[in-house]
Amino acid sequence: MKVKLEEKEKKIKQMEEKKKKIKQMEEKEKKIKQMEEKKKKIKQMEEKEKKIRKMEEKEKKIKQKVKQMEEKEKKIKQKVKQMEEKEKKMEEKEKKIKQKIKQMEEKEKMVPNACNAIVLHNQRRRPKSARMCYRQLLQRQ
């Protein structure tokens, strides 16, 4: 009887040890699962970080493009201003040239010559000779 009891106790102890081992194994499995989940989360986080980096890079590129466009716009505005200034200068030169032409025409009118005398002669109501008109022009000056 005693031997049987001892054997039973041994078996019970063995069973308890087996149970403990099983529990330990289950705990290890749980830990492994947790670690795997952590790894998955870490991978997900890394992927998110990669996406964020890509987005940041895209943003940087877009900002650079915007800067380039602004610079181009500034250059275009400067060119437009320069062209406007050139246009103004050209208009001023044109005005000066026109004034000079008018002055030259007025001087030509004032200078007595045979052509002017003939014009005067033709404009008169009472015709005079071209010589008389020429003398008249000379006297006016």
Image (cartoon, rainbow, N blue to C red):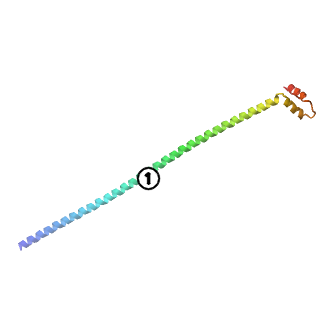
Q: Nearer the viewer, residue 128 or 77?
A: 128
Q: From this view, report whether residue 62 is shown above or below residue 90.
A: below
- What SS does tag 1 mark? helix
Residue 101 sits in quarter: top right
Q: Identify the residue at horizontal 58%, vertical 43% (top origin).
A: 76
The residue at the far right in this view is 126
Quadrant location, the N terminus: bottom left
Residue 88 sits in quarter: top right
Q: Identify the residue at horizontal 87%, vertical 27% (top origin).
A: 134
Q: Nearer the viewer, residue 112 or 79?
A: 112
Give how far across and how far down residue 120 sits, in percent.
87, 32
Q: Identify the residue at horizontal 74%, vertical 33% (top origin).
A: 99
Give how far across and how far down residue 114 sits, in percent.
85, 29
Residue beneath disc 1: 55
Give how far across and how far down residue 137 sits, in percent.
86, 27
Q: Identify the residue at horizontal 18%, vertical 67% (top origin).
A: 19
Check disc 1: other Cα within 10 Å, few if <14, some if 14-19, many if 20+. Answer: few
Q: Nearer the viewer, residue 119 or 21?
A: 119
Q: From this view, report whether residue 130 is shown above or below residue 40.
A: above
Query: Going by the image, does 49 lie left or right of 141?
Result: left
Q: From this view, report whether residue 128 is shown above or below residue 18.
A: above
Residue 82 sits in quarter: top right
Give how far across and how far down residue 90 sits, in percent.
67, 37
The residue at the far bottom in this view is 1
Q: How many marks?
A: 1
Quadrant location, the C terminus: top right
Query: Going by the image, does 37 lie left or right of 3?
Result: right
Query: Going by the image, does 64 lie left or right of 20?
Result: right
Query: Going by the image, does 73 lie left or right of 125?
Result: left
Q: Mark 1: which amino acid?
A: Met
